[in-house]
Amino acid sequence: MTERIVRRIAANEAELVELASALVGFDTTTRSEDHEPAREEAALQRFLADRLASMGAEIDLWEPEPASLPEAPQIPQGATFAGRPQLIARFPGRGYGKSVVLNGHIDVVSAEPRGLWGSDPFTAVVEGRRLIGRGTCDMKGGIAAMVMAMAALQAEGIELAGDVLINTVTDEEINGAGTVASLARGLQADYGIVPEPSDLRLCTSNRGIVAGRITFTGRPGHADIPQPHWRDGGAVNAIEMAVPAIAALQDLRGRWIEQHDPGSPLPAGNIVPTTIKGGEWVVSYPSDCSFEVDVTYHPDQADSQGAGSGIRQQIEQAVLGSAPDPGWEAQHPTDFTWYTDLPPVALPENHPLVEALVQVAGELDLDPGTVAHPSWTDAASLTHAGIPSMVIGPTATRPDGSATLHTIDEYVDIDDLLATAQILALAIVRLTGS
């Protein structure tokens, strides 16, 4: 059976590349703020729904209503999914095996600056054994592999004992809300696999992510004129308040690195300032300054709910402790706006899902070892909801060691796409029974 499945998927290479290319052709650039209008998410999801329905799947395609969403750090207050439907396609088994969900996100990061691309980022191009285009790697290639894995099992006439679900979601790149909305809809399975790019390595753990904006309030005044003390009406430089705060976060990051267990598969937690804005005029004291931070943290740094409340508290304490003038800070408090909290996760090496995928990888002569995912994936949301999940997917790293995802001329190795589809198909059989 293994040989038949592997051969079938290899023979369907052209169809796999064609499907991945079609998905790339939909502009599903993720939103950076909730008010941004949808792009072509609905059209892509309908395209997938029609494809999966033609294969015999039971289709649930819906736009989550705000009232149906749980209160969760990943769901921004007032969030809406207008024009951004979620999809659950169910292939019923014979009723007595385990169930498995294949989960993938359809949203992609911005293709800007588009002028640096060698080709249109939303028109997939084959060069040698690579497929180039925005989302080929992260993760429309993985979604195509999900569909083709199931198609191969059907073509080989393999009847499964348990259900197979294909869940494609929006908003993973910003806050993971799509998978949370799917779980609120009732998504459930015994196991989950997320074919995010991983260089065909088995990822059993990932760090959590906290992201937010820290804003300092100053007082404007003429930059060329000597200013009295602020208590006497003088100007206050908001940028100069942000500088020691960033230094304080660098110190906190250094302490995390010192405390990091070198034997951990996960990199140390990190704090990275990623944007900064401040000031109104070159000859005026800035009245405000804000910077955003991307913070990654370990499962052992999570709170009792598996989230990052303690991490947020550490950051706030470090920033407030760096205030140049506590008196000004007391009257004009620093504002902390936290966007989201994506939970970390770690599956034990002896978990049945891990053991099954190690065996599958070995059957395909791949390195069966397990690694940690340095970022975050929807596997964490699934696992925390009672669906133990892990990541395995195609190309993530260029030969020079840099990432293929979130970059100019993003690409996926076609051979990796084939291997991903083969892994998924064999894993489905092993996990659900036949």
Image (spheres, rainbow, N blue to C red):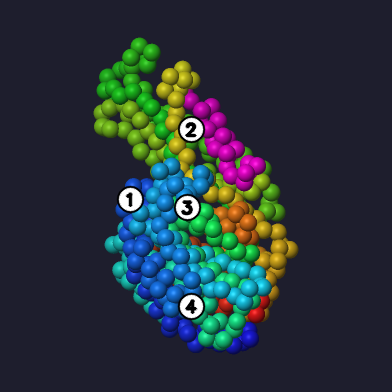
Q: Secondary structure at mark 3?
A: helix
Answer with left or right where residue 295 lies relative to residue 23.
right
Q: Which residue is mark 1?
A: 36
Question: Measured from the top left, where is residue 408 in percent x and y?
Answer: 38, 63
In the displayed structure, 67 sits above or below 45; it is above
Read off the residue under disc 3: 177
Q: Is residue 271 visible?
A: yes
Q: Inspect the magenta stretch and tell me whether residue 47 lies in it.
A: no
C-alpha separation, residue under disc 3 versus residue under disc 2: 30 Å
Q: Nearer the viewer, mark 3 or mark 2?
A: 3
Q: Which residue is mark 2?
A: 245
Which residue is rendered at x = 33% and y = 50% of the image?
36
Give how far apart the Cα atoms at labels 2 and 4 are: 56 Å
Query: Which region is colored magenta?
Result: 301-325
Magenta stretch: includes residue 312: yes
Q: For the residue marked with disc 3, what is the amino acid?
A: Ala
Is residue 15 rendered to the left or right of residue 116? right
